[in-house]
Amino acid sequence: MKGKVPEKSLLALSQQEEVVDLLKDYPLSASEDEEDNDGERKHRKLLETIGCLDGKNRQRLAERSEASLQVSEFSVSTEGTGEKLELAELLAPVKPSSSLGTVKNQLKKVRKKKTVELPLSKEENERIHREAAYNKTSQDMDKWDPVVLKNRRAAQLVFPLEQEQVLDAPIEEVLGAWKARTPLEQEVFNLLHKNKQPLTDPLLTPVEKASLKAMSLEEAKQRRAELQKARALQSYYEAKARREKKIKSKKFQKVLKKRKAKEVLRQFEELRKVNPTAALEELEKMEKARMEERMSLKHQNSGKWAKSKAIMAKYDLEARKAMQQQLTKNRELTQKLQAPSDSEHDEDAEEDSALIPDVVNEAQMSINGPNPWMQKNRGVNTQASHIQKKPVAREESEPEEEEKAGAEDDALLQEVEERRSLRKGSEVNQGSQKQGHRTKAPRRTEEDEEVLAELRTLSKHINKKANKMRQDGEQHVSPAPAAPKEPSIQREEQSLLDERPERVQTMEDIETLGMEEVSQEQKQLRPGVKRRWQQQPQRQHNLAEQRSPPKMEQEPMIDLHTIITGKTHKANFGLSVPTIVDEEDCDKEVTQKQIIKEAFAGDDVIADFQKEKREAEKASTPKDIDLSLPGWGQWGGPGLVISARKRRRFLIKAPKAAPRKDKHLPNVVISEKRNIQAVAHQVNVLPFPFTHQNQFEETIKMPVGTTWNTPRAFQKLTAPRVVTKPGHIIEPIKEKDVEPSSSHLGPPTLQRKGQQHAHPRRRRLKKAP
Amino acid sequence: MKVKMLSRNPDHYVRETKLDLQRVPRNYDPALHPFEVPREYTRALNAVKLERVFAKPFLTSLDGHRDGVNCMAKHPKSLSTVLSGACDGEVRIWNLTKRECIRTLQAHEGFVRGICTDFCGTSFFTVGDDKTVKQWKMDGPEYGEEEEPLHTILGKTVYTGIDHHWKKDIFATCGQQVDIWDEQRTSPICSMTWGLDSISSVKFNPIETNILGSCASDRNIVLYDMRQATPLKKVILDMRTNTLCWNPMEAFIFTAANEDYNLYTFDMRSLDEPVKVHMDHVSAVLDVDYSPTGKEFVSASFDKSIRIFPIDRIHSREVYHTKRMQHVISVKWTSDNKYILCGSDEMNIRLWKANASEKLGVLTSREKAALNYNQKLKEKFKYHPQISRIARHRHLPKTIYSQIKEQRIMKEARQRKEMNRIKHSKPGSIPFVPEKKKHIVAVVK
């Protein structure tokens, strides 16, 4: 009630705006005067009601009262009629306006509004605080979720998490703290100071600074380009040299050598012109060395050491190398410096070849020569072998005129190369022959003789074979028109192709050849396959002829049975015969049973079971082990047959199996696979994380050890889950370790970045004006 | 005809220097190495047997205290330094490498209730029964100098525990309420209360360093936030929690050591149900400490044993005990994840290997590889009965063994009774309560 009374009295004021304000601000307040008024009125009412209680004395007594009590100064009285005054009525006569509408609404709201609750107790207040705080902190904690999850799932965790970074303090700090004390240190310091070695900030000597300044960016670029060009050129020349070195033509090498010699001579001449004394000295030196060598013959291979090495050379790589070195040395030393005439050069070369014991090179041919990996190591060796490889006949036929002219060199080189390409093929075939020729070289030490004899026989053998091969090849080649100048590789291919002339005749084969690029092996395989295919029909025909009568016999039998038993193949088995007989007997009386039987006639359960049992028995019986190896202790080759004696000897007979448990139980199969000894070691329940036994078996099947895995794989497979460093303190995970992607760490990093960006801008601004 | 010779690249078989290892070519064709599973199984069996053979975890005992060791603290910067406080008010600092006491000081009258080092390792704090908090220098007094604390704070009530902030010069004590102190001031920055009961331990979260956890004797665990200076939430368990420890790698995980023989691992965001209940002890669990890797924790119990639990397992992977070790009051896992220290009633501190069969000292790479391989094999075949049997086998003193048996019987009886009750009552009338929820009485907001 308290609320209503002041409302009314205040409304009387008809100052609506103020009313609203007041109501909002002090909803519970009421002026004291009016309370007094109220009290009086109540008192009066009480009196009236008491008066009314007595029914007879209903008549109202006219009372005197002050007008001000009934008619208020606001000309509205709530007294008298007893009717309640509606707020809306009060407002009704006034013109309906928008402002009043809002007031009405506000008044309605005010009426609906209940009293505001008391302020919360301290405990409840705290509780709300706690809850809010808890929610906030637990939300904060969510940022750790990804980190924790990652660490839990990590295949390997290495602790301490953040590897200690070696903090290198700037050198000025280190030096600043340190002072020279001993005299030695002071001396060193003095020296440093003299050189103006900077100890503090700049870290560069004035000279270094100057040099840095001197070279601008463009210059540096230019210089780099130059260097690049030089490097490219160098590599190009190197490649060229390597290519030239690889060329095996003797003639080409000879020309090359000559050119080089001339170059050297020219240089020497130049030197003589420019600095005659130096040239003279050099000449003298060379001459002296040559003379000494000639006198001593130290580097000939006639010494004791050289002889022993010559023996070893066949087997020992190093000995061979040493010999080669010695020989080259010898050649260098004995050579005269004057421009050698061609004839002399040839002689020299011949001498060289003669000086080298043939064994050395032969060994190389056989062991080292074809080994592509070793080729780079032996410049001289190859040369020597080239000399050997050269056929004698060709050497004779080569015109000497060609060699003379220096200007013609280039043309010559081209020609040589052409010839080389031509010769390539013939060399391959003739190689063995040449070896044979070489072995007959006159100069030879006695020790070599034995080895050489062996080699000779061997080479002859090879020669014969090679000749045969060649003849064969020619025979094959003859039908096909082969170009004589084609390299040998092509010829080889051709010969391969020629091995199967009949196949190509068919259209299909030609088509397939044209259609697809079949590799050589496949091509080789095909004829065989074809042949087989061709043969098969023939064989089949033969077989068919042979077998046809029995087949014909079989077929009607099957037909009969199928008709009788209800058209099944299984009925053919002997075991199912009784059922058939049954059916035949009771053929006339069609009973329910028979119908069922007929229905299930296809599923011959008994036969199936017995077959199963037989198979199980078969599987459980131990088998003999045949250890005989075909080709062991006898000549190998196609059509190999192991003799019965050998087979008998190497056959391990299986022990007789223990009688089966189901031996006397015709209707039961008892599996004997279960090994009681192994049961104790086997897992009989599928462990928890696995959902299927296959998964588990897979994990067990995969071996981990080094026996089955490469070292790298082994390392990966056996990597421990947690790695700790001994003697290192592992500190709790830090805020830093939270990935920056998480939103919580976003703002600070951004701020930092902003700051960093801000500074240069400011600087720029400062610079600009 | 060109004869193709077999040729090998010398790089593949020639050593560059004679100090190089010989290259041993291997053929990994599985046909040449049959029986991989049986062979590895045998190896695994051998490995697991050897592990048991070499399982000698006890390293040394540090004796010197004249009363039970009540509390211990690790040095934050030095692995070899450990501090311990005894029930007679004596504090000792130990050097683990030399296995000797390097300093002794009489810190309090009565118990040393709590000890902790500051985050930089220059000083340490102790609280005792004499209602004081004392700060001491880590280095001993110089010659002629008196052994005196740097600061002494006189309180009104007994402090029962102390812990230092991980990054700032702030520490927290507990007693009647949780007080947070600045190192420089003699009055607390703020004190937080929730109900009136003696709080037995308070611990700072090592990662989110503003969060604290405490446990009081009215069976509750309360979490606080230092920033908001309010408690956050309270969980009431069946029985009193003695202490708790935060996981140093997972910010929201902590484990509470309870009087009801169990340990409870909670996620602080959902306190109504523990993540895991670890149950293996047969008496009250008195202390717990996490390994610095956050993968395991060690617990000390009144049953005279310490156990190591993986955080995601209900049962322990290891139990350590000796004949002479009495009730273990405090336990610590060293910060290099290698050793465990436990202080017990009978005045000794014992040093154990965290991994019982680990070989100490520097290992060669081959040894390491072999160890890793063995570990992998054990893991691979762990489900095989023989291997799991050997790996599981531990010797226990008779008292613990019989108690375990007894408690198992009791538990089974309880379960049986419950099952029977469910069976013989109207379906749905007795709700099924999972094991995890059984021990939680209430969560108070």
Image (tube, rainbow, N blue to C red):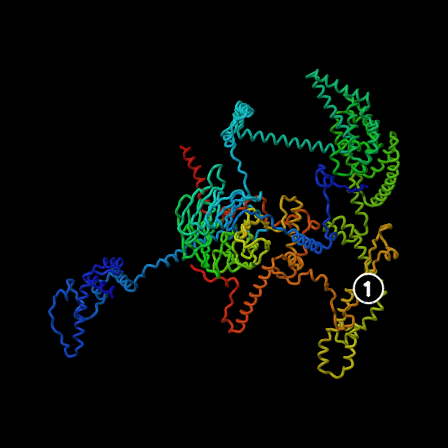
Left or right? Give the position of A350 relative to B147. right
Question: Is residue A138 visible from the viewing direction of this image?
Answer: no
* Towards the viewer: A211 or A393: A211
Who is closer to the viewer here, A119 or A475?
A: A119
The structure residue drawn at horizontal position 39% and vertical position 47%, both measured from the top left corner, is: B187
Number of labelled discs? 1
Task: Tell me if residue A395 can be seen.
Answer: yes
What residue did someone put label 1 on? Answer: A656
Horizontal placement of A327 versus B323: left or right? Answer: right
Nearest the eye: A286 or A406 = A286
Question: Farthest residue toward the bottom?
Answer: A589
Quadrant location of the C terminus of chain B? Answer: bottom left
Question: Is residue A457 positioned above or below A154 on the image?
Answer: above
The quadrant holding residue A668 is: bottom right
Quadrant including the N terminus of chain B: top right
Q: Position of residue B133 (x, y in %)?
A: 43, 47
Residue A689 coordinates in the image, percent (x, y): 60, 59
Q: Amino acid at mark 1?
A: Lys
Chain at tag 1: A
Image: B289 above or below A762: below
